[in-house]
Amino acid sequence: MSELLNALAGWGVNVAIAITALRTNLLRSILTTLGVMIGVFSVILAVAVGNGAQVSVNQQIATLGSNMAIVVPEPERANGPPRPGDRGRLTERDGEAIARQVPGVNAVAPQIRTSVQMVTGGRSASTQAIGSTEEYGSISNLATSDGRFLTGSDVGAATRVVVIGQTVADKLFVDINPIGETVRINRVPFTVIGLLESKGSNLGNDNDDQIIMPISTLRQRLSTGLAQGPDDVTLLFVGFEDEDSLVAGDREIKSLLRARYRVSKGKITPFTVRTTKEIAETSGQVTQIFQAVLVAIASISLLVGGIGIMNIMLVSVTERTREIGLRMALGAKRRDIRNQFLVEAAVLCLIGGAIGLTLAMVAAAVFQQVAEFPAPIGWDTAVLAVAFSAVIGLVFGGYPAIRASRLSPIEALRSE
């Protein structure tokens, strides 16, 4: 126990000497910490932005729904994107076949999407109209904060009703409850029956800037641009019971649709199937690469800061040669001299790291408020950043410290 206390007391003395030396050359110490401070600031902010990108992607995928497959009428080519001449095909009947024949399917929601112009009370707004069925709400985790969602009766009767997002409501109805109000969509009157719960924005995409109406109504009343067939759709949302059934269902959907379209082996399929699990994995890989590139670029400034620490510590050794010789003459061992300069470099970097961390947290908070983009900095990242800054001090301060410990006491005392 006494040996441990003596060791701690020795390190405490080294810290006190380091702080005194840094205060003696205050301006130089401040300028030296700038490199480490900027490096730590850049690395932490890069990690925060990368984490924020991952959070945004996960939120965006969550708005689509969980355990879901998305089928689009886009030919799937093994060697690159589809050619301009390739044409896909997907119909409501395909969705009905998937619901009947693919195990583990909870619901299928066919969709038609088109841009529309809405007008009411002298106000107008352009938005995206989604024509679908009552299953679309459950598959996509959509709920109404006021009013109701579509029903089977709405779809069957092709009623002119619409559920609107919060952004659309803010544009068209100021201080007015939109439920029951009439809006003209591409000059066709519709009744607002529901207001969707807000889902916010992700990666610049406003999830509340949309309206939903019965697919039959959109097909009959509005121009969709789908001229291939009477029940063609823009895409299908297929909801599954769990992740296991989703993985198996992905293969089942492809097999079923290939059989329905009589696609022989080796031929291009007129559709593409993507699952939320695949989208999440691909997006995760992309954001990890993005974050790694950001951290690598930011680490260059940290490396420059470490080199600056080494240069200043070499200057400090040169300036304090007589002090080193005097300490050795009074009985200080080589390891004491080495530890003194190592601690001084570590303290210098710790101060720079703490300031860099503080600035990064402030910048991340401002970034989240201004850009509405998440930039989380966890406590593990903060602690790791400060500890890493101390390691930078030990690594780059190692050579000057060893050089100081190897000075000859007699030659050191003779220096001017």
Image: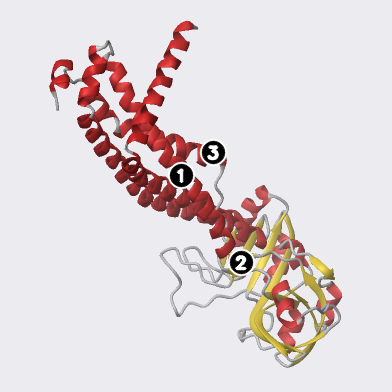
Residue 44 visible: yes
Q: Where does the image place residue 251, in percent across and percent down from the top left?
A: 60, 56
Which label is found at residue 245?
Answer: none
Residue in the foreground of this view, choosing between 126 and 392: 392
| Colour pattern of the rendering | secondary structure
**Residue marked by disc 3:** 380
Which residue type carries mark 3?
Answer: Asp
Q: Where does the image place residue 296, in percent across and percent down from the top left?
A: 37, 49
Q: Secondary structure at mark 1?
A: helix
Sort mark 3 into few (<14), some (14-19) or many (20+) by Cα contacts within 10 Å. few
In this view, which residue lies farthest toward the top?
A: 2
Quarter of the image where the C terminus is located: top left
Which residue type carries mark 2?
Answer: Val
Query: Which one is closest to the eye, mark 2 or mark 1?
Result: 1
Q: Quadrant of residue 209?
A: bottom right
Q: Residue at x 67, y 77 (%)?
A: 112
Query: Which one is closest to the eye, mark 3 or mark 2?
Result: 3
Of the residues under marks 1 and 3, which one precedes in the sequence? 1
**Residue marked by disc 2:** 71
Residue in the foreground of this view, choosing between 71 and 369: 369
**Residue marked by disc 1:** 355
Q: Secondary structure at mark 2?
A: strand
Instruction: Determine whether label 2 and label 1 are within 8 Å by CB.
Output: no
